[in-house]
Amino acid sequence: MSTAQAKETVYVDTYTNGILDPNEPMLGPVRDGGHIIANTAPGCWGPMITPKLRGGHEVTKPVFVEGAEVGDAIAVHIKSIRVTSIATASGNDKTMEGRFVGDPFVAAKCNTCGTMYPETRIEGIGPESVRCTTCGSDVTPFVFTNGYTMGFDSHHQLGVTLHQKAAKQIAEDGHRFMAIPGGSSQNPIVTFAPHDIVGAVARVRPFLGQLGTTPSRPFPDSHNAGDFGSFLLEAPHDYAVTKEQLEERTDGHMDINRVREHATLICPVKVPGGGVYLGDMHAMQGNGEIAGHTADVAGIVTLQVRVIKGLKLDGPVLLPVEEDLPYLAKPFTREEKERALQAARSWGLDHIEDTAPISFIGTGATLNEATVSGLQRAANVLGISVPEVMNRATINGSIDIGRDPGVVTVTFLAPVPLLEKAGLADVVLKHYQLES
């Protein structure tokens, strides 16, 4: 792959079967500094009711980035995100016992004929419409406990949850209303026509629930994180891992709503070329994704990728747009710096720190474990102690939930000399337009 001519722009409209496999060929290569333009397929619910998909999502095939070697990092700049779906459906889930082996996201089976990863067809609408092509049985591993169908305004600025009549109309032509790309194999979740919440209005602010690099062993895409990944430990299916093997993940499945247009995500490189992939676009989501799912949509995304040589990361580092930073982690204005320096001098101190915002992603089986992960990752990258990170995140930042049960961000103002030593200063200072 690395010997091929690198392209300025790689266009992506093909998808995995739910497994991120470093042994599979990648698309590209894209040049260092080049662009990836992808038509992403909807994430959670559509793949969840498509038993032949083996990961719970349907992300884009990874792209090889020129010059990216194991032990480097790739800065992924999100240039634009545009929703293409006209409508979607989502809600809280309930698993259907007997229709999976150990994990309904990863190892679906038909409870009647016993076929693993069965091919399906859609018959009618509603929660019993996904049928095994072998025996005709209702085969979906998931149904809603409380669900809704949402339609968007023509500018994709607002969504409204719809009544039964509109939900059924959308269900009859689900692929069109969800704008599911031609290369996708998922069943459209609007086929279930949920309508438990009617007339609720939500602001649209799209982001990517999945963005990252390829892990160094095959992982189900939705389980490429410390919380969902813990379900793979000694699991009774083909994708079981040990605790040590779980560390080969890259935490691309974050569901952090700040991974949106104009943010930058810095990702670890654990396989040659990195293998940048994306998907699971959401129309909106509050911190925590507490319902387990949100409004999955298709869309068009433009990314720019840049290799950072020698920056070894265990997990991603996020540079949110300034608007999304916690109040205490926003860059200081020139006036604030001048007043702070005056205060310092009044106490006999002749200088103040030069700092910039940074956000480390932590994941784990629980939110407590995720917090420990994020603190340790920050300490490792910056070469300081965990207690120092704790202090800085307390007075200059925040710990925020990305996804319950186990994704957090550890955000704080970091001293620029530490960022320089780590190899992060250039990308951080440029992102926030700060002077070096």
Image: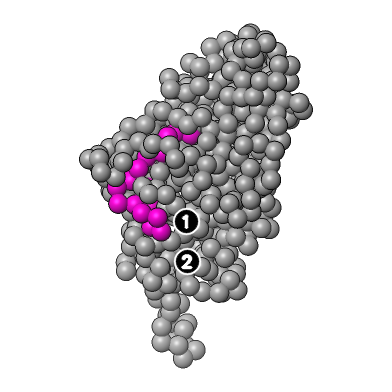
Q: Disc 2 marks which residue?
A: 381
Q: Quadrant of residue 137?
A: top right
Q: Is residue 319 above or below residue 128?
A: below
Q: Quadrant of residue 232?
A: top right
Say whether residue 249 is magenta: no
Residue 247 spot, x, y in % from top left? 56, 54
Horizontal side, residue 36 vs residue 95: left or right = left
Which mark is first along the chain, 1 or 2? 1
Residue 402 spot, x, y in % from top left? 59, 49
Please rate how many residues cluster around mark 1, counting C-alpha atoms within 10 Å: few if below 14, some from 14 to 19, many from 20: many
Numbered range of the magenta stretch: 59-77
**Which residue is most to the top?**
124
Determine if residue 100 is in view: yes
CA separation in Å, label 2 and label 1: 10 Å
Q: Secondary structure at mark 1?
A: strand
Q: Quick one: quadrant of the N terminus?
A: top left
Q: Is residue 277 above or below residue 136?
A: below
Which residue lies at the image location 70% right of the left edge and 29% below the top edge? 100
Closer to the eye: label 2 or 1: 2
Residue 299 spot, x, y in % from top left? 44, 30
Residue 295 spot, x, y in % from top left? 57, 31
| Amino acid bearing label 1 | Val
Q: Indicate which disc residue 267 carries.
A: none
Q: Disc 1 marks which residue?
A: 317
Which residue lies at the image location 57% right of the left edge and 65% below the top edge? 376
Closest to the observer, 340 or 161: 161
Q: Say if mark 2 contacts mark 1, CB within 8 Å.
A: yes
| Amino acid bearing label 2 | Val
Q: Is residue 104 above or below residue 140?
A: below
